Image (tube, rainbow, N blue to C red):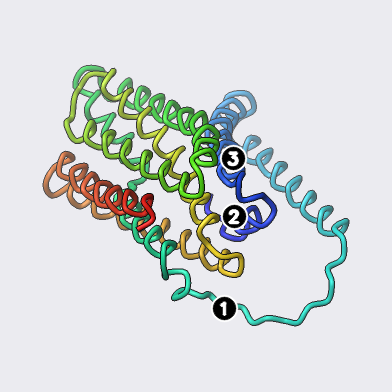
Amino acid sequence: MRVPARNALLADLVPASRYGRAYGFERMMDNLGAIGGPLLALGLVAAVGTRLAIGLSVIPGLLAAAAIVYAIRHAPPLRQRDRQPIRIRVRPVLAGGLGRLLGSVAAFEAGNVAATLLILRATELLEPGHGHTRATELALGLYVGYNAAATVASLPAGRLGDRLGPRGPVRVLAAGVALFAAAYLLFAAGGHGLAVLVAGFLAAGVAIGCVETAEHAAVAALAPADLRGSAFGLLATVQSLGNLTASAIAGVLWTTLSPTAAFVYLTAWTLLALLGLLTAARGR
């Protein structure tokens, strides 16, 4: 989930030496939700039916809203401050090392396809040997493994970024992007063996756990305090537009040429991003 205000607030509340751990924990909890939510939904549908399960799903949202209202009412009063106009400062964010980082992130996001395409690729490759229904079940199981790998990787990736110094998150981000490139090459090769697909999904899961943690930690570390809101807003924009573009173009290539062409295209963007990140990690 991309929430710029939450990420900027977290950067203000956490010491700089713990950015990686803070964002790693945040991503771990989000990924746990991605695993537990669907499994809980399946259990509820099986136990009480679809209509009642949808009705029960309203309860967590209401509890969250009540918790937010409670927190607002019991928060200490803010000191009176002069009103400041709301401005999104793009040009200062794109200057210096932060701008180079966001440029590399933009290249990565242009190749960061929706996980749906990975599921479709797995289903297509498994179908000849397992039939459509079984192939679909296996592909969904691989997706659960992908989310599990992302969950497990998030917090260690954050800790490693903290230990590697001020540019540690950039180095972890580069490692995650490199792992993504390797995963995409496995999907491009098109091996029909289940073991190959397991390796590809797990590699992609670990990669996204590293990348999502390190992107936020790196922006928090490089953005001046007065630009953090704009920096995280720009990061969320880059992520959203990049994902949309990557999925759309990969889909066109898949349909008009082949799945291999689509994944080669995605790999090219990840390699371009990796080159930029390696330069940024050296502080150039």
Determine whether 6 is above or below 51 in the image. below
Label number found at residue 67: none
Q: Nearer the viewer, residue 246 or 78?
A: 78
Instruction: State yes or no: discs 2 and 3 in contact (Cβ < 8 Å).
Output: no
Query: Dot 3, how many residues are within 10 Å of its Cα: few (below 14), some (14-19), or many (20+)?
Result: many
Please provide percent x and percent y for residue 170: 42, 48
Instruction: State yes or no: discs 3 and 1 in contact (Cβ < 8 Å).
Output: no
The residue wearing badge 1 is: 87
Residue farthest along the left direction in this orientation = 257
The residue wearing badge 2 is: 7
Disc 2 versus disc 3: distance between alpha carbons?
A: 13 Å
Q: Earlier in the sequence, mark 2 or mark 3?
A: 2
Label number found at residue 21: 3
Quadrant hosting residue 29: top right
Query: Dot 1, how many residues are within 10 Å of its Cα: few (below 14), some (14-19), or many (20+)?
Result: few
Which residue is pictured at 36% across the width and 54% down the height?
280
Which residue is pictured at 25% across the width and 17% down the height?
130
Disc 3 versus disc 1: distance between alpha carbons?
A: 30 Å
Q: Earlier in the sequence, mark 3 or mark 1?
A: 3
Q: Nearer the viewer, residue 264 or 127?
A: 264
Q: Which of 18 and 55 is in front in this view?
A: 18
